[in-house]
Amino acid sequence: MEPASIDKYEISSVLGSGATSTVYLAHDAFAGRQVAIKVFRSSILSDPKHGHKYRKLIANEASLAGRLNHPHIVAIHDAVLGQDKCYIVMEYVEGETLEKYGLPESLLPVEKVIEIIFKCALALDFANRNGVIHRDIKLANIMMCRNGDIKIADFGSAVLTRSDQTELVGVGSPAFMSPEQIRQQSLTQQTDIYSLGVVMYMLLTGRMPFEAENSYALSHKILNDEPIGIRSLRPALPLMLEKIVAKAMGKKLENRYSRWRDFAQDLSNFAALELPRETVSETEKFNTMRSLSFFQEFNDTELWEVLRISVWIRAPVGTCLVREGEEGNFFFIVTDGEVKVSREGKTLGIEGAGHCFGEMCYIRHGSTTRTATVMANSPVTLLKIKPESLMNASENCQFRFDHAFLITLVERLTQADIQLASMQ
């Protein structure tokens, strides 16, 4: 019989059950949110042979509570590690793992794979900068949310690089293990880079890079053999993509990406050069925002948040984007091209990428009367954001916008003073 509650958490249903734990959907009345609770079986914790190992793995994951706050990492909210009960409270993610998308009959579009791997690379870079190596990156530990976004889960096997605790060996999933992990050597972020390379290989080809009849033979292949190139399995894939996968899965550390940022940059370059131009991937949008002066103080987490609350639009030359005297309840940030700003028919200036306009509707918390007209002076790409969307964003994200708007205001006042002085 399932429990009605676990401490302060009201149980709604069972999400899944395995040999070591049962995962429940529950309601946290204090925080007003749904959560997933992984409850570990008392039998595995008291096991004389493996109990210590399980407790250490659970303690690893529990130690990350509140530590890895990133839009593409499943958050750990709470944990209890006692003698009579042991559980971890996590963010509830509606969706599925990536496992089925590593099969030939259900491959995702290439641009979606690039987006997924790019987001994972940035999330794991964030984890690494916070002293965490995941050590068990695989399709089953990456969640595809209902809205198409992704989240990395299950940090139970993680290595805490800033801890003096003894590292457990022999954990991870053999098919995704790096050569140095199989050799039980000291690990760096490069082991997760290798594993994510395997994930990418499978998402693009529907095949594992190495297959064998047992784990010993599989380990021998990972240590000694080269995987078949992805273009041999799927010839339509670009050569540039094959090189990225091969570098991520480099057998020797010196041949593998040494930093997540380098891996992410190559994915971004591929997206910009190789993907169809009729759509703009989230990877490209993210990097476009990162390059703009307006967003220079925003961190990765805040940029992903901006991406979620904004709409990207393109407008041909001559399009009237804002008309003076009319009411407006949205603002724009130019990401590409130029706009002409005028008032009463008199041109006030030409502004390019990184310029914002219409932001008074956010500053005044509602619809405002436009005081100038803004026209597309060339084909332009813009972010369109409604004030209510930004007001529902995190406090950090709002603070970054407030600061960016303040800088913009100071720059405009300075420019106005210069123009006034030149007229005297």
Image (cartoon, helix red, strand yellow):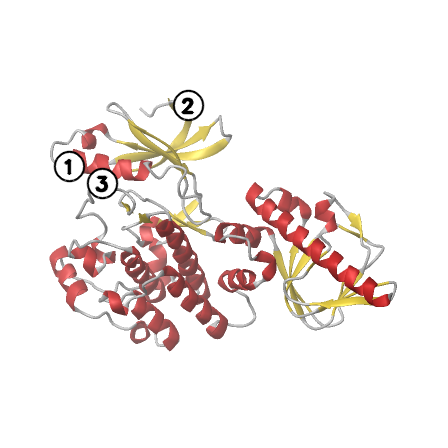
How many residues crowd around disc 1 within 10 Å: few (fewer than 14), some, or many (20 or more)? few
Depth check: give the residue in front, 357 or 163: 163
Q: Splitting the image into 4 quarters, where does residue 229 fall?
A: bottom left
Describe the element under mark 3 as helix, strand or loop.
Answer: loop
Q: Quadrant of the C terminus?
A: bottom right
Q: Is residue 289 left or right of residue 411?
A: left
Depth check: give the residue in front, 180 or 177: 180
What separation in Å lies between label 1 and label 3 (alpha carbons)? 18 Å
The residue indicated by pointer 3 is 165
Mark sitting on residue 50: 1
The residue indicated by pointer 2 is 8
Indicate the amino acid at tag 3.
Gln
Q: Is residue 356 left or right of residue 57?
A: right
Mark sitting on residue 91: none
Depth check: give the residue in front, 341 or 282: 341
Question: Residue 358: in sight, yes or no?
Answer: yes
Residue at 63%, 46% in the rendered image: 389
Depth check: give the residue in front, 85 or 263: 263
Where is residue 26? Give x, y as percent: 42, 30
Give above or below for 160 relative to 256: above
